[in-house]
Amino acid sequence: MQDKLIRPIDSLIATYAESHLNPTNEIIHFICVPAIVFTVMGLLWSLHPLAAAFLSALSLLYYLRLSPPMALGMALMSAAMLFVLTMLPQQQIWKMSLAIFVIAWIGQFIGHKIEGKKPSFFDDLRFLMIGPLFVLGFLYRRFNIRY
């Protein structure tokens, strides 16, 4: 009998999930991870809107290699975030982004203190990119979408 090959996306999400088992930490991550993604885009947008779009496109290439369905979800999320940035007062985006970025990271570290485990990205920086997929994967499973 031949074992099924484990896809890199499944392995990465499973490894990430190992340090996100506490329900409180999960909730914190479901709020803070998208907030961090949005604020990174906002900080780049403050430099130049194309910088945010470029980072988005680059990250989507990485996600596409891991899982086309996840890349589609991330593309929709990125498009929504970029759209929201077009609606905000341009001179306020960097201030708002910086404040939310700091608060969201504090939340993340509080979640890991509750969990009793260090953040995954301390072992592998790729997990900074996997966090959003972890959150998206939860939504995909909830709505029975295969990734």
Image (cartoon, rainbow, N blue to C red):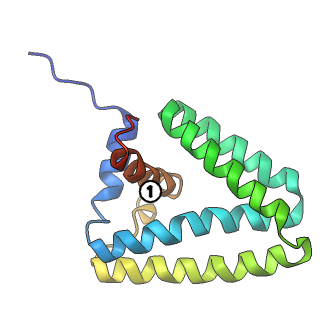
Where residue 90 appears, as percent x and y from the top left, is 90, 70
Q: Residue furthest top?
A: 1
Residue under the point 40% across and 45% down: 140
Q: Which image quadrant for residue 82?
A: bottom right
Q: Is residue 57 above or below residue 82?
A: above
In the foreground, 128 or 85 = 85
Residue 62, quarter of the rendered image: top right
- State the residue in front, 96 or 125: 96
Q: Answer with left or right where residue 25 lies relative to residue 99.
A: left
Q: Is residue 89 above or below residue 49?
A: below
Dot 1 corresponds to which residue? 135
Q: Residue at x 91, y 76 (%)?
A: 91
In the picture, measured across the screen, residue 84 lies left or right of residue 92, that is: left
Where residue 70 appears, as percent x and y from the top left, is 50, 39
Please identify the quadrant where the C terminus is shown.
top left
Q: Give whichever of 18, 77 is nearer the camera.
A: 77
Q: Position of residue 133 (x, y in %)?
A: 47, 50
In percent of width and height, residue 98 lies at: 72, 78
Q: Quadrant of the N terminus?
A: top left
Residue drawn at 34 percent across, 46 percent down: 141
Q: Residues within 10 Å of mark 1 (few under 14, many from 20)?
A: some
The relative height of residue 53 versus residue 17 in the rendered view (above or below) is above
- Helix, strand or loop at label 1? It is helix
Q: Residue at x 27, y 59 (%)?
A: 18
Name the kind of residue labelled 1 in the image. Val
